[in-house]
Image: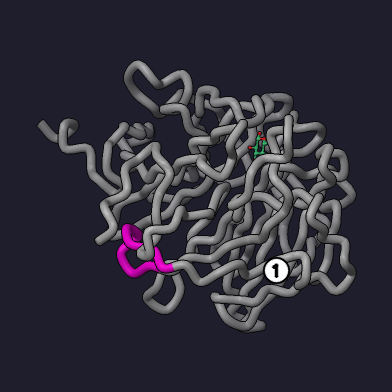
Amino acid sequence: MVGANVNGQPWRDDQGNLIQAHGGSILHYAGDYYWYGEDKGVANVEGTSRVPFVGISCYRSTDLLTWQRIGDVLTAANDPSQQVQAESIVERPKVLFNALTKQFVMWCHFDTPDYGFAGCLVATATQPTGPFTVQQILRPNNFDSRDMTLFEENGQAYLVHSANMNKTLYVANLTPDYLGLTGEVRKLFIDQEREAPVIFHEGEWYFTITSGTTGWRPNPALFSRSHFLVANQKLIDNPCQGPKKATTYDGQPTFGFKYQGQWYLLLDHWQREDLQHSGYSILPIEIHGRDLVVPWVDQPLQRNTAANG
Ligand code: GAL
């Protein structure tokens, strides 16, 4: 019997093994949830805050609490051009199902060990459980790209990436097959240095939650809102509460998702000197009219019962 996972700590899968799905995202497909993330299941390279590239992992769940490890769905061996190597940085995988091509399309941050390349890796699979084959490695629209996410609405998908040396978030339209870029780009939070972008649409608002740019060290999250995804987004406030507000509960956002009518935020709790033991949490995102609150709760998916009193 595997004990329940606790927010802020490393988590275990249904076999009792550490879940290696850092910088992750969740895809809901055909009744199941697929969590893709960075498999960092080896020791840090001596004296550094990085691990060699092990793979992009996939875990499956029906309740978002118990996770079955599928395995690494993208490894260096899935790259026909062999640009992906053990020393490569492959981070923050996001997967969309493309209804036109019936392919699962993954975009990741792809980089050299010094984070100097600053691009994206695009890979595809015919099943959510992979394997994913690398299609291309690119700098989107010839801009630099580090932390990133995908956002899709009504078949139009966007790559949202930290660009201009992490100063500004760019929103780049994807082609209908999600494999490339149309060239259309808009800018959010010019010179505000935001990363770890989370984007979601609820009612009349498009919200974002982002972190500042302090590497593995935590900093205050901020939310923004606008009636439009790509216009008028203004940074408003930190949605966290209490004594650990200034460090986002010692975490960094990685993904937002809706489950049973409630929005949730998936966070990483990085251990920079021992990355494989970094923790996770899933916290509720409460929408109070135009404002967001992300309260701390001890159990993943727990609602903030205190707020209802
Ligand atoms: C963070 C980023 C992580 C990782 C890290 C490396 O700012 O959010 O995904 O790239 O830097 O230092």
Indicate left or right for 255 with 283 as reference. right
Q: Residue at x 79, y 55 (%)?
A: 86
In this figure, which colouring scheme has been used for the structure?
one colour
The image quarter in which residue 231 lies: top right
Identity of the residue furthest to the top in this view:
243
Q: Is residue 6 left or right of residue 275?
A: left
Q: In the rendered image of this protein, does residue 185 appear above or below residue 63?
A: above
Q: Return the residue nearer the eye: 275 or 80.
A: 275
| Residue 65 lies in the magenta stretch | yes
Query: Foreground: 164 or 268?
Result: 268
Q: Quadrant of residue 302?
A: top left
Amino acid of disc 1? Tyr
Q: Position of residue 218 (x, y in %)?
A: 54, 26
Q: Residues within 10 Å of mark 1 (few under 14, many from 20)?
A: many
Q: Residue at x 60, y 55 (%)?
A: 39
Note whether residue 82 is visible.
yes
Q: Which residues are magenta?
A: 61-68
Q: Secondary structure at mark 1?
A: loop
Q: Position of residue 97 (x, y in %)?
A: 57, 73
Residue drawn at point x = 38 percent, y = 50 percent = 203
Please name the residue that numbered disc 1 is placed on: 178
- Check if residue 227 falls in the magenta segment: no
Q: Is residue 149 visible?
A: no
Q: Residue furthest left?
A: 309
Tell me if residue 271 comes above or below residue 118 in the rendering: above
Residue at point 73% right, 35% down? 46
Q: Quadrant of ligand 1?
A: top right
Split into 4 quadrants, where in the image is the C terminus? top left
Across the whole image, how many numbered discs are drawn on residues?
1
Residue in the foreground of this view, choosing between 42 and 236: 42
Image quarter (top left, top right, bottom left or bottom right) of the N terminus: bottom left
